[in-house]
Image (tube, helix red, strand yellow):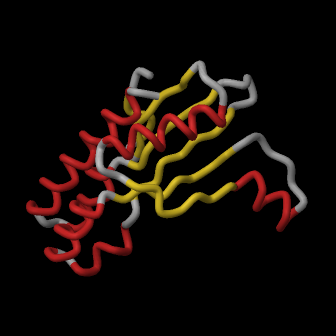
Amino acid sequence: MEVRRLSNYSFGGETEIGFDEAIKRVSEALKEQGFGILTEIDAKRVLKEKLGLERRPYKILGACNPHFAHRAIEIEPELGTLLPCNILVYEREDGKVVVSAMDPEAALKLVGNPAIEEIAKEVRSRIEKALEKV
């Protein structure tokens, strides 16, 4: 998948594969980069259960690399409020699947600590490599 900036706070792209396969591939590619999926929010299911709304598939994966998370929390204990890194997979109206990620560099600029910005740069690089494999 070709990865590009999607907004001031995210990057990713669209893929030709189906939704379930995209979830599988992004999870595997993140694992190769040292990330685990800590949370999985199925927004389609939650909105159906809680509000009776129908929507296309939409999942938010909470990805974490323990090595980087530990380093960052040691430097800035409050940084946990910005963790984990969210990876979004959703199906558009035209059936195309989009895979995107929160840009850790954009989010962690809020901290205002150059040591954290270096960690964010490495985290972004690894997530981008993972998304390229989807």
- Left or right relative to 81: residue 72: left
Residue drawn at (19%, 47%) of the image: 121
- Left or right relative to 8: residue 60: right
- Left or right relative to 130: residue 27: right
Q: Is residue 122 above or below residue 42?
A: above
Residue drawn at (28%, 63%) of the image: 66
**Quarter of the image where one finds residue 23:** top right
- x%, y% of residue 113? 13, 66
User: Between residues 28 and 77, which one lies in front from this camera angle?
Assistant: 28
User: Between residues 69 and 77, which one lies in front from this camera angle?
Assistant: 69
**Quarter of the image where one finds residue 93:** top right
Q: Is residue 108 above or below residue 57?
A: below
- x%, y% of residue 41? 62, 59
Residue sticking out furthest to the bottom: 77
- x%, y% of residue 46? 76, 61
Q: Is residue 83 above or below residue 133?
A: below
Quadrant containing the N terminus in the rendered view: top left
Residue sticking out furthest to the left: 114
**Quarter of the image where one finds residue 124:** top left
User: Between residues 107 and 127, which one lies in front from this camera angle?
Assistant: 127
- x%, y% of residue 42? 68, 55
Residue drawn at (22%, 62%) of the image: 67
- Left or right relative to 35: residue 74: left
